[in-house]
């Protein structure tokens, strides 16, 4: 039986509303993920379906009926819940524990029928818990018990599945196993509402996401629509790079740093970073954390360094990917180099498209306050030797050299005379 779960103008909570006037529909055949900061009301939305949270106004319906109109047995035939914390257990075997999921399908004192045994066996096979059948539940690890609790929920053969942090106790292998099972069941017609803290997993397995924040649902949409740099800043106070998982094609979130750190007062001077192809990402972050005001040379935002600089809100000269820097680009970088307190250049693949960065620093005449990090090996020089010549000219005119990023802050302090 395929049914939807709907919240219509619902205000939900306990002694007082936690979320107010929220509207949301979870349709058969989809996974809808709830994301948001701790305490925002994600669990409250889940509990409201099973009666664990109070409905102050509006409606919560399963199918065409308000959840309050169902008896507990009727509701259990349609809705199953995997709670955030596993239930207290007694000395049941794992098999007996999963069989409890068939409670709504048998009479109070009835025995399990063949169909019930089949449902239990299928649920344990799906969750990889068949091997635990004879084990006592109170002796199992938290991860095994969580998988077993999911098996119990699936044994109900529900139409709606509610998951509150379904992988919180699981190792990576079992995390993928559980979410693969949930995704397969949703593809088969199950309506799934799941609370996630892992944003990458939420993006990979959800059809849609809803943000729970400030007492409501301010943003709903596909993972690509919801997981934006702006939303993550507003929601979690985090600067992040948003990319694409190269294997699954799903949205990928790479947190860089807390926004409060990025926004604190600068105390240690202004530094221009010249880099590319990912060589400067860690340096940008490190210098920002150390209290420097960081800016960047000419970069494409499709470059890893460009994406990180944009996520951190750093000033940069944006250029087209795989297109040579123009004279204006070089002039802009030269002017920036003259205005800052120090320049950090990382050993980077230099070619026709970004060689203007090196030309700009040499032309600015700031070698005495330039730090070169790493070695510009022939493998990094795609400019027929010009990059090496420019690099060496900086060394000969006073640039300081560092073997790696670890020493850069120390050398910068020496260059700045602090």
Image: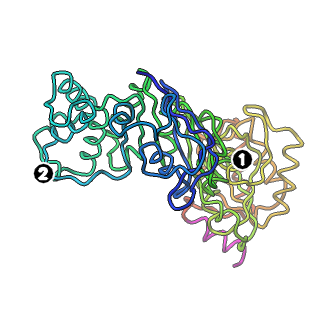
Instruction: Assess whether residue 408 is covered by the magenta stretch.
Output: yes
Which residue is located at x 50 percent, y 58 percent? 14
Residue 49's disc number: none
Q: Position of residue 292 (x, y in %)?
A: 70, 67
Q: Mark number for residue 91?
A: 2
Q: Which residues are magenta?
A: 407-418
**Mark before the other along the chain sequence, 2 or 1:** 2
Spot the residue most to the bottom: 418
The residue lying at 65 percent from left, 60 percent from top is 259
**Nearer the observer, 157 or 126:** 157
Residue 186 horizontal/vertical position (percent): 43, 26
| Residue 262 seen from this side | yes
Residue 203, relative to residue 3: is it above or below? below
Q: Main secondary structure of the magenta part?
A: helix
State the residue position of label 1: 389
Q: Is residue 78 above or below residue 403?
A: above
Q: Secondary structure at mark 2?
A: loop
Residue 200 forms part of the magenta stretch: no
> Relative to 31, is 96 on the left or the right?
left
Q: Nearer the viewer, mark 2 or mark 1?
A: 2
Q: Residue at x 16, y 41 (%)?
A: 94
Is residue 280 visible in the rendered image? The answer is no
Q: In this orientation, which residue lies closer to the viewer: 231 or 192?
A: 192
């Amino acid at each position: 039986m395929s049914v939807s779960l709907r919240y219509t103008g619902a205000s939900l909570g306990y002694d007082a509303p936690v979320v107010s006037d929220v509207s949301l529909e979870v349709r058969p055949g989809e996974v809808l993920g709830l994301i948001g900061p701790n305490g925002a009301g994600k669990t409250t939305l889940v509990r409201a379906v099973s009666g664990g949270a109070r409905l102050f106004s509006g409606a919560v319906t399963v199918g065409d009926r308000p959840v309050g109109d169902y008896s507990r047995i009727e509701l259990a035939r349609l809705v199953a819940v995997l709670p955030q914390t596993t239930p207290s257990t007694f000395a049941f075997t794992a098999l007996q524990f999963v069989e409890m999921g068939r409670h709504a399908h048998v009479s109070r004192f009835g025995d399990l029928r063949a169909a019930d045994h089949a449902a239990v066996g299928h649920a344990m096979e799906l969750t990889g818990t068949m091997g635990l059948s004879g084990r006592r539940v109170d002796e199992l690890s938290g991860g095994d018990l969580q998988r077993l609790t999911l098996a119990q929920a699936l044994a109900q053969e529900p139409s709606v599945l509610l998951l509150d942090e379904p992988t919180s106790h699981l190792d990576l292998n079992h995390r993928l196993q559980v979410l693969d099972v949930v995704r397969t069941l949703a593809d088969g017609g199950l309506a799934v509402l799941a609370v996630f803290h892992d944003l990458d997993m939420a993006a990979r397995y959800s059809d849609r996401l809803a943000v729970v924040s400030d007492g409501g649902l301010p943003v709903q949409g596909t993972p690509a629509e919801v997981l934006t740099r702006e939303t993550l800043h507003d929601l979690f106070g985090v600067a992040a790079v948003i990319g694409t998982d190269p294997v699954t094609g799903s949205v990928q979130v790479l947190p860089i740093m807390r926004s409060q750190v990025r926004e604190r007062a600068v105390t240690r001077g202004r530094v221009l970073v010249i880099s590319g192809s990912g060589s400067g990402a860690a340096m940008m972050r490190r210098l920002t954390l150390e209290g420097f005001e960081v800016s960047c040379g000419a970069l494409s935002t499709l470059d890893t360094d460009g994406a990180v600089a944009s996520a951190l809100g750093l000033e940069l000269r944006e250029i087209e990917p795989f297109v040579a820097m123009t004279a204006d680009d070089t002039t802009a970088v030269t002017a920036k180099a003259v205005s800052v307190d120090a320049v950090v250049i990382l050993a980077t693949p230099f070619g026709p498209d970004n060689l203007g960065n090196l030309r700009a620093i040499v032309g600015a005449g700031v070698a005495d306050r330039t730090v070169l990090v790493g070695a510009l090996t022939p493998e990094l020089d795609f400019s027929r030797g010009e990059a090496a010549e420019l690099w060496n000219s900086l060394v000969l005119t006073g640039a300081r050299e560092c073997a790696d990023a670890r020493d850069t802050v120390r050398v910068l302090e020496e260059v700045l005379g602090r």
